[in-house]
Image (spheres, grey):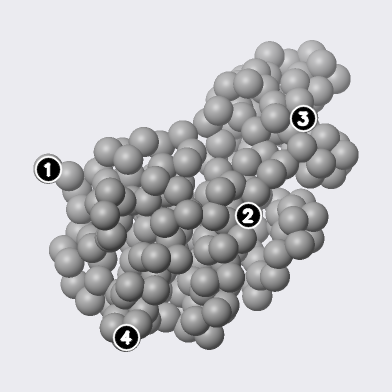
Amino acid sequence: MSGRQPATVVAVTACVGFDLDMTLIDPRPGMAEAMNTLAAESGLPFDGEHFAANLGAPLEHVLREFGAPEDRLPALVARFRQTYPDLVIPRTVALPGAGEALAAVRGAGARTLVVTGKYAPNAQRHVRALGWTVDRLVGGLWSTAKATALTEHRASVYVGDHVGDIRGALAAGAVAVGVATGPCPRDELLAAGAHVVLDSLTEFPRWFAAHGERGAITPGDAPGPAR
């Protein structure tokens, strides 16, 4: 079984949500450096390359998995966030099609929403550095907790690269659009319940326009090779 949802029709939304890391942006070089810097400063066995290759889970969860003592977590998180603007922002690039995807939503008269597990002030720095216009950004939410923001802002489409993003979209009753640009391959995203998986955001404007012009979005129906 693929885990794909039934092909029901969802009314076109006034708001489309996007994840940030490995959906809109590629921050991996800076993330690896920031985590390795934290390891050197703290004397703890953090692996920046492993961290950067598996972006998705909240920082506190990642540090716990690396074996960080619970009583040191607040200081470690604060230090990572402090070094982030200098180490990560300058090394981050937009993923192919990201700017065009945001523009397609706004061009259709809908609002853009970024919902990310990242610390919101640093997420905003990325948006500003790339010169993007985003109507609303909500940080600090992961997996099904993302449904809170998606529901509040009435997003009926959510786009993300991680199975946690798919779970968040489904929990909000939104169309779950996966992009195979992060750590989760196509089959994993489909098994988690993604209605459609795109190879990258370069395919998103075509998908969005094809369904938007009919006045509805049909989950599970994507153009060409993006099925």
Neighbourhood count class around disc 3 (C-alpha, 10 Å): few under 14, some 14–19, many 20 upward: many
According to the picture, the residue beneath numbered tag 4 turns out to be: 215
User: Given the image, on which type of amino acid does mark 1 rest?
Assistant: Met
Residue at x-position 58% and y-position 52%: 24
* The N terminus: image quadrant: top left
121 and 17: which is toward the camera: 17
According to the picture, the residue beneath numbered tag 3 turns out to be: 34
Q: CA distance from mark 3 to mark 4?
A: 44 Å
Q: CA distance from mark 3 to mark 1?
A: 40 Å
Residue 97, x across and y down, in percent = 54, 55
Q: CA distance from mark 2 to mark 3?
A: 19 Å
According to the picture, the residue beneath numbered tag 1 turns out to be: 1
Neighbourhood count class around disc 1 (C-alpha, 10 Å): few under 14, some 14–19, many 20 upward: few
Residue 15, x across and y down, in percent = 50, 77
Q: Earlier in the sequence, mark 1 or mark 4?
A: 1
99 and 7: which is toward the camera: 99
Question: In terms of secondary structure, where does tag 3 sit?
Answer: helix
